[in-house]
Image (spheres, grey):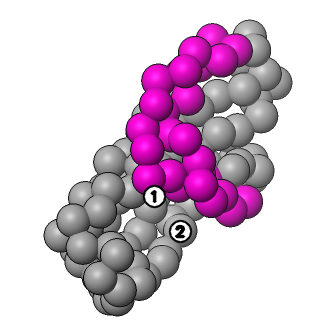
């Protein structure tokens, strides 16, 4: 099961990285970000993010990807929660889909 962690200092204007590891080598995924967390069971997985935005990523040969972004330096991002999760198609999974853990990144 792939996992996700965040690195960096989550403050407006600062860079952060969302690291996904443990996925299938060279797998394509959808990295999702939302301002709201949910808990919705789908295909033997649990969706944890009400996605407002997403971006496609591709894991490297070891099943890893680090997605970097700078938090906008705007007042709207002060005391803001960003909820992250990635999903993959995986033929080895009974449902054909796997999801990472959710990540709650609080921007101070």
Left or right of residue 24, residue 106 in this image: left
Q: What's the residue at 59%, 55% (across, down)? A: 52
In the rendered image, residue 48, in percent from the top left (x then y), is placed at 48, 33
Which sits in the foreground, 78 or 92?
A: 78
Q: Main secondary structure of the magenta part?
A: strand
Q: Counting residues from the N terminus, which is met first, the one under dot 2 or under dot 1? A: 1
What distance separates the C-alpha of mark 2 from that of mark 1? 6 Å
Q: What's the residue at 46%, 31% (across, down)? A: 38
Residues shaded magenta: 31-56
**Looking at the image, which residue sits at the far left?**
108
In the rendered image, residue 58, in percent from the top left (x then y), is placed at 71, 59
Magenta stretch containing residue 5, yes or no? no
Q: Is residue 69 above or below residue 100?
A: below
Label 2: which secondary element: strand
Where residue 17 sits, quadrant-wise, is bottom left
Quadrant in which the C terminus appears? bottom left
Mark 2 and 1 residues: CB-CB less than 8 Å, in contact?
yes
Q: Is residue 76 above or below residue 52?
A: below
Can residue 57 be seen from the camera position used here? no
Q: What's the residue at 55%, 41% (across, down)? A: 50
Q: Which mark is residue 19?
A: 1
Label 1: which secondary element: strand
Which residue is tagged 2? 67
In the rendered image, residue 10, in percent from the top left (x then y), is placed at 26, 71
Can residue 47 be seen from the camera position used here? yes
Where residue 54 sits, quadrant-wise, is bottom right
Magenta stretch containing residue 33, yes or no? yes
Which sits in the foreground, 75 or 5?
A: 75
Left or right of residue 67, residue 107 in this image: left
Q: Which mark is residue 39?
A: none
Q: How many marks?
A: 2
């Amino acid at each position: 099961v792939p996992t996700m962690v965040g690195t960096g200092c989550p403050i407006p204007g600062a860079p952060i990285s969302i690291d996904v590891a443990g996925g299938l080598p060279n797998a394509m995924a959808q990295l999702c970000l939302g301002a709201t967390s949910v808990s919705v069971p789908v295909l033997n997985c649990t969706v944890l993010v009400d996605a407002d935005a997403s971006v496609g990523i591709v894991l490297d040969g070891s099943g890893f990807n680090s997605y970097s972004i700078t938090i906008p330096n705007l007042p709207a991002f002060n005391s803001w929660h960003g909820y992250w999760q990635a999903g993959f198609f995986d033929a080895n999974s009974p449902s054909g889909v796997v999801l990472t853990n959710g990540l709650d990144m609080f921007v101070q």
